[in-house]
């Protein structure tokens, strides 16, 4: 009887394991299990930022999915050269690393989320390649474990003397910087990265598509959890239709085509020559307000190109282009004093952010505050009223980008008892600042708060108060 019961229990356990996906991780639950996500560093997938603040197109999508499930997320980041092995190992719920369907049928994937293709990037001064056959005798780099590396390996079977170099560490932007500096000739990338890359390395171009359009999916691995896969596919279908995916895409791509090549080249030059003169003032502003010094610097560049003597025909003046009323409100005695103007501009941004509704999250809170920096608080408030009138969400920059330009039309601004305002200019200002801020984050480090060290006398008193003995001076010591 005991043996029969034991056998029955083993059978039930075996059926349970099979039902869970042949050894899949348990379905994530709020009380017990996080959603375990396999990923790798990249501008489209996952990037660990300063102060442990992660970002990335797929990261934001994963966070929205986890919120729907009511669970936390554990990210397992893997170096490019190790990713394929980890993908096959399968000890994760899903892999989100800008992946296309895998050649191995055992790796189950989700419904398509995006469409993209692989392209070849080269220096703008090099002869363009327009046919795959022209890759003969060329050396092309790609990150190991990526779809681009697999694409190049397939091409190498057909094209004589095509040399493929798979780089096992680092990130794609580092490789593209090497192309811009003339250290390597060609890099295979995902086409979605091109616009982002051109903000940082403006002397690149793509001339040769390496594949047709391909889907981007999440991989559930060799031991998928069937319930989780069903929930993920339902989530993907929903966000593609309810605007969630479009809003997330806007965060990463909505501004990247605003600056042209000449704008970026000029800005990179000003970072080298002009920014060092004022950097200490931007850092002082961060110390006083908490606003990232690079964001304040981006605002100042958009407003005045870092010219402390800038003056507009409407008497807006200084490096932060403050109006006379705003300067008086902030206690600025001289708008042409760079330090005063910069600190006042950062303080003003803080006030504009604090004036927004508490439910406005980041980064929308910052972008909306920047539009108010340009329009003034009154016109910004009118634009939010107009958004509500038109059924748009006033707390989302994605929505407000199409509402703000309407303030230039009488039928709209009179509808909310406002005045005519150039809301389209505010959108351009915000989008430009976003691009300048991205570039500064890439090229300039975060401000580090100085470590306060106690003077020797204070340290002795502190040691005495803590029960530590201060060392006695030798009795016969002599001054030198």
Image (spheres, rainbow, N blue to C red):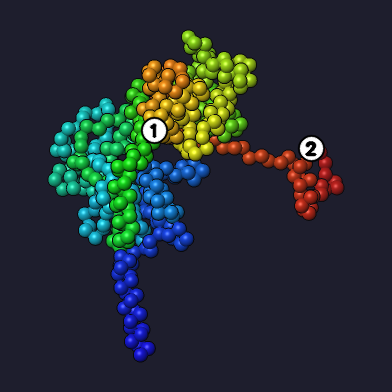
Which residue in the protein does label 1 denote?
392
- 292 or 232: nearer the eye? 232
Is 96 left or right of 367, judged from the image as shown?
Answer: left
Residue 36 found in image quarter: bottom left
- For image coordinates 21% across by 41% down, the residue present is 213
Where does the C terminus fall, quadrant-wise?
top right
Residue 328 found in image quarter: top right
In the rendered image, residue 82, in percent from the top left (x then y), is placed at 34, 54
- 432 or 234: nearer the eye? 234
Which residue in the protein does label 2 denote?
480
Mark sitting earlier along the chain (2/1) = 1
- For image coordinates 44% across by 55% down, the residue present is 71
Is 386 left or right of 120, judged from the image as shown?
Answer: right
**Which structural element holds mark 2?**
loop
Examine the rendering and report whether any part of residue 367 can be seen.
yes
- 425 or 163: nearer the eye? 425
In the rendered image, residue 302, in percent from the top left (x then y), is placed at 45, 22
Give the Cα distance between marks 2 and 1: 77 Å
- For this orientation, the residue located farthest to the bottom is 1
* Total residue callouts: 2
In the rendered image, residue 18, in percent from the top left (x then y), is placed at 30, 69
- Residue 271 against residue 242 in the figure, above or below: above
Q: Residues within 10 Å of mark 1 (few under 14, many from 20)?
A: some
**Which structural element holds mark 1?**
loop
């Amino acid at each position: 009887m005991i043996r029969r019961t034991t056998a029955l229990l083993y059978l039930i356990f075996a059926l349970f394991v099979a039902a869970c996906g042949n050894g899949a991780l348990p379905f994530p639950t709020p009380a017990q299990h996080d959603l375990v996500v396999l990923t790798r560093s990249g501008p489209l997938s996952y990037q660990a930022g300063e102060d442990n603040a992660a970002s990335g197109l797929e990261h934001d999508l994963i966070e929205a999915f986890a919120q729907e499930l009511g669970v936390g997320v554990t990210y397992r980041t893997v170096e490019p050269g190790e990713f394929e092995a980890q993908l096959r190992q399968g000890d994760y719920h899903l892999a989100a690393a800008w992946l296309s369907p895998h050649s191995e049928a055992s790796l189950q994937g989700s419904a398509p989320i995006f469409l993209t293709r692989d392209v070849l990037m080269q220096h703008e001064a090099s002869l363009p390649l327009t046919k795959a056959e022209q890759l003969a005798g060329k050396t092309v780099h790609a990150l190991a474990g990526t779809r681009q590396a697999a694409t190049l390996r397939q091409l190498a079977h057909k094209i004589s003397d095509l040399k493929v170099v798979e780089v096992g560490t680092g990130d794609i932007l580092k490789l593209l910087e090497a192309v811009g500096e003339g250290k390597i000739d060609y890099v295979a990338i995902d086409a979605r990265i091109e616009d982002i890359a051109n903000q940082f390395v403006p002397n690149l171009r793509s001339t040769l598509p390496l594949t047709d359009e391909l889907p981007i999916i999440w991989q559930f691995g060799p031991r998928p959890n069937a319930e989780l896969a069903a929930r993920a596919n339902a989530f993907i279908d929903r966000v593609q239709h309810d605007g969630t995916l479009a809003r997330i895409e806007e965060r990463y791509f909505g501004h990247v085509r605003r600056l042209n090549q000449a704008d970026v080249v000029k800005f990179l030059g000003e970072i080298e020559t002009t920014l060092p003169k004022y950097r200490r003032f931007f850092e002082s502003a961060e110390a006083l307000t908490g606003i990232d010094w690079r964001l304040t610097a981006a605002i100042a560049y958009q407003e005045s190109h870092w010219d402390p003597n800038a003056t507009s025909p409407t008497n807006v003046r200084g490096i932060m282009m403050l109006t006379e009323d705003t300067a008086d409100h902030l206690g600025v005695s001289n708008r042409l004093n760079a330090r005063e103007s910069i600190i006042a501009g950062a303080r003003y941004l803080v006030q504009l952010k604090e004036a927004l509704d508490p439910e406005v999250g980041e980064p929308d809170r910052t972008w909306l505050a920047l539009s108010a920096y340009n329009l003034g608080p009154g016109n910004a408030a009118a634009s939010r009223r107009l958004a509500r009138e038109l059924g748009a969400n006033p707390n989302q920059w994605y929505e407000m980008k199409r509402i703000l330009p309407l303030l230039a039309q009488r039928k709209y601004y009179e509808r909310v008892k406002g005045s005519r305002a150039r809301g389209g200019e505010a959108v351009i200002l915000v989008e430009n600042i976003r691009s300048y801020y991205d570039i500064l984050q890439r090229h300039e480090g975060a401000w580090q708060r100085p470590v306060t060290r106690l003077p020797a006398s204070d340290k002795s008193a502190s040691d005495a108060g803590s029960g530590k003995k201060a060392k006695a001076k030798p009795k016969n010591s002599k001054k030198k």
